[in-house]
């Protein structure tokens, strides 16, 4: 029997054993730690600015260098992890980013923090390439989407956990302790990873039945063939994805790195009080991530073409972001949280469909490479956003120009996507890519 990808599957095989789900749990916790270490700087921004005397431009520069390293790492880490393997690749990545997270406690200047954030960005960029590679090694195709969804949920769990854990640490033990304790979490995970993780065929706890199930749809030689990386830049589909990520990923980075500061400046919140609004925003983002993917699937099931279903879902998400232009003008905290939460949910729904767009328009053997290129473009957009926000806050003193950009970015991106790829054609890979 063949699955939709053409790989041979055996319908008689049944999963026997759950070692692969223990691996999935480790990937989930690594992603959670990744986002805690990433977001802590935003949570502590008001505290650090007050104690260390940073300007808004200083903070923007610190974020800029994190994004720069993240972009560089996304382009470089994939081939490196393919070469040395998931076990050592992931171990090296979390070791680098955990040391870098703890190193923040050694610095007081913006320059020192920029160095620490640059190292953090290099390490953190390997998280998703290493995690997705691990999923490919440990799960048959029929379970990979579920496993990837579970580990990706760690991102929002980390974003929710940070405003709960970090303020408690900072208030009781100081901001340095917050960096040290959260950094130590990575080393606890690292011990578990090195002790437990092996390739399925080398793992002593994997039964013969579970190994057969994991390998039940091993890829064919054709599916394993690689397209040269540089050739991907010849295709409109690549540029559509790159442009969309470049324009819209900075909005998500805006939420991660500046939302606590916005609530502090506009609504007078502090370490003790901005936790619940942040949690509400990221819970709504979880809903949007699932809802956005459901919307396009529901439209396609009702008879819409793949092209129409995906683009209508992208349009709906783009429109739901636009009210964010009013977020800095409303006086009610509840209204601001609702507007920003809707935008965060719409961004996640947008991302779900944008990722699926890549699989709609590219052969499977090229999807990961295109995702890496697009992720790097998004990080570059985040670099520009960091400098822009710092400049705006220092000169204008308001988030209004920033939210105006955020509210229009998705509609502009969708227009460009449609111009470059007027029709998604999942049945003709090469044609769709040109």
Image (spheres, grey):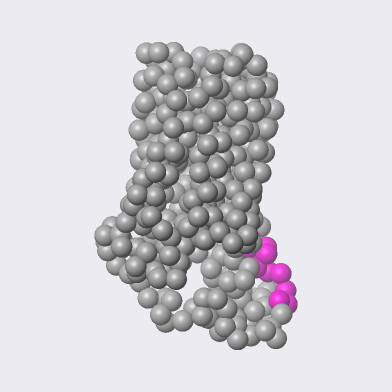
In what quadrant of the picture does the N terminus appear?
bottom right
In what quadrant of the picture does the C terminus appear?
bottom left
- In this rendering, is residue 266 above or below 387? above
State the residue in front, 358 or 381. Answer: 358
The magenta stretch spans which residues? 15-24
Q: Residue furthest front?
A: 303
- Asked if the stretch drawn in magenta spans residue 183, the answer is no
State the residue in front, 370 or 319. Answer: 319
Left or right: 315, with 119 as reference point: right
Residue found 44% across the figure and 71% down from its top: 427
State the residue in front, 289 or 28. Answer: 289
Q: How many marks?
A: 0
Q: Which quadrant would residue 402 be assigned to in this image?
A: top left
Instruction: Indicate the position of residue 207 as horizontal and vertical percent values.
Output: 69, 79
Instruction: Indicate the position of residue 135 as horizontal and vertical percent values.
Output: 56, 65
- Asked if the stretch drawn in magenta spans residue 20, the answer is yes
Instruction: Indicate the position of residue 360 as horizontal and vertical percent values.
Output: 46, 62
- In this rendering, is residue 408 above or below 47? below
Q: Main secondary structure of the magenta part?
A: helix
Instruction: Indicate the position of residue 359 as horizontal and vertical percent values.
Output: 47, 62
Residue found 50% across the figure and 39% down from its top: 318
Q: Quick check: can you spot residue 169?
A: no
Residue found 54% across the figure and 21% down from its top: 326
- In this rendering, is residue 220 above or below 60? below
Residue found 71% across the figure and 80% down from its top: 14
Q: Quick check: can you spot residue 137?
A: yes
Left or right: 308, with 71 as reference point: right
State the residue in front, 115 or 62. Answer: 62
Left or right: 38, with 161 as reference point: left
């Amino acid at each position: 029997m063949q699955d939709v990808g053409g790989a041979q599957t055996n319908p008689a095989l049944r999963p026997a054993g759950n070692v692969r789900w223990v691996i999935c749990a480790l990937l989930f916790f690594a992603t959670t730690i990744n986002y805690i270490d990433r977001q802590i700087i935003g949570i502590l921004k008001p505290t650090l600015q007050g104690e260390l005397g940073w300007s808004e431009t200083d903070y923007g520069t610190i974020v800029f260098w994190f994004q720069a390293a993240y972009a560089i790492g996304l382009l470089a880490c994939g081939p490196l992890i393919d070469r040395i393997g998931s076990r050592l690749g992931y171990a090296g990545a979390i070791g680098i980013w955990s040391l870098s997270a703890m190193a923040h406690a050694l610095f007081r200047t913006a320059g020192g923090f920029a160095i620490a954030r640059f190292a953090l960005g290099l390490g953190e960029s390997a998280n998703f390439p290493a995690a997705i590679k691990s999923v490919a090694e440990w799960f048959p195709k029929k379970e990979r989407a579920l496993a990837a969804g579970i580990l990706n949920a760690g991102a929002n769990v980390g974003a929710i956990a940070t405003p709960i854990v970090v303020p408690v640490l900072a208030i009781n033990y100081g901001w340095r302790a917050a960096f040290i304790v959260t950094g130590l979490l990575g080393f606890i995970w690292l011990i578990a990873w090195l002790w437990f993780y092996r390739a399925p065929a080398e793992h002593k706890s994997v039964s013969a039945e579970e190994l057969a199930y994991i390998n039940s749809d091993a890829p064919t030689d054709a599916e394993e063939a690689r397209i040269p990386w540089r050739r991907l830049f010849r295709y409109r589909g690549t540029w559509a994805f790159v442009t969309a990520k470049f324009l819209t990923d900075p909005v998500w980075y805006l939420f991660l790195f500046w939302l606590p500061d916005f609530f502090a400046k506009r609504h007078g919140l502090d370490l003790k009080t901005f936790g619940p609004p942040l949690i509400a925003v990221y819970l709504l983002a979880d809903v949007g991530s699932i809802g956005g993917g459901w919307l396009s699937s529901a439209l396609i099931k009702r008879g819409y073409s793949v092209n129409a279903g995906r683009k209508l879902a992208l349009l709906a998400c783009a429109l739901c972001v636009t009210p964010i232009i009013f977020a800095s003008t409303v006086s009610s905290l509840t209204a601001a949280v609702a507007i920003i939460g809707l935008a965060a949910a719409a961004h996640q729904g947008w991302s779900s469909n944008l990722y699926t767009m890549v699989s709609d328009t590219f052969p499977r053997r090229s999807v990961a490479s295109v995702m890496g290129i697009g992720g790097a473009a998004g990080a570059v957009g985040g670099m520009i956003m960091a400098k822009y926000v710092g400049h705006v806050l220092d000169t204008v003193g308001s988030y209004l120009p920033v939210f105006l950009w955020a509210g229009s970015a998705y509609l502009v991106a969708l227009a460009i996507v449609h111009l470059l790829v007027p029709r998604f054609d999942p049945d003709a890979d090469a044609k769709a890519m040109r």
